[in-house]
Image (cartoon, rainbow, N blue to C red):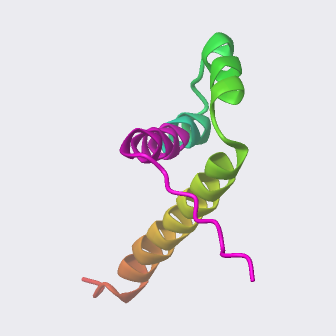
Amino acid sequence: MPRAVRHHRSNEEVCSAVRSFFRAFKTIAWAFLGIRKNKDRERDFESLNIVHIAVAGLISAAVFIGLLMAIIHWIVTSPTP
């Protein structure tokens, strides 16, 4: 029976993937604000992993919606003078 081949990532590859993921969050944050230079946006799309951008976008959207819901809940439940 053939043995399963394990693929080990080096520390440098892991660090690069983590940096790419955090750069994706930075890109998503700028996109939410609507301030991004065209040159920077094109560079990000060329260098970032599309999966990192998608996951960062979904997490950012969930955090944004949760924050809005928390603010609305705080306003609605606050006592009126």
Which of the two residues, 47 or 36, is positioned nearer the viewer here?
47
Q: Quadrant of the N terminus?
A: bottom right
Q: Name the residue located 64 percent from the left edge and 66 percent from the top edge.
A: 5
In the rendered picture of this protein, how many numbered marks are placed on residues? 0
Identify the residue shown where x is 24% and y is 83%.
Answer: 81
Judge from the rendering whether residue 76 lies leftward or rightward of residue 61; answer left or right: left
Quarter of the view holding residue 44: top right
User: Image point 43% across, 82% down: which residue?
Assistant: 73
Q: 24 left or right of 46?
A: left
The answer to whether residue 34 is left or right of residue 25 is right
Q: Position of residue 66 (x, y in %)?
A: 49, 73
Q: Position of residue 25 (x, y in %)?
A: 50, 45
Q: Which residues are magenta?
A: 1-24
| Residue 35 magenta-highlighted | no
Which of 62 and 4 lies nearest the eye of the viewer? 4
Image location of residue 10, percent across then percent down: 43, 46
* Horizontal arrangement in the rendering, residue 14 relative to residue 27 (left or right): left
x, y percentage for residue 39? 66, 11
The residue sitting at the right extreme is 1
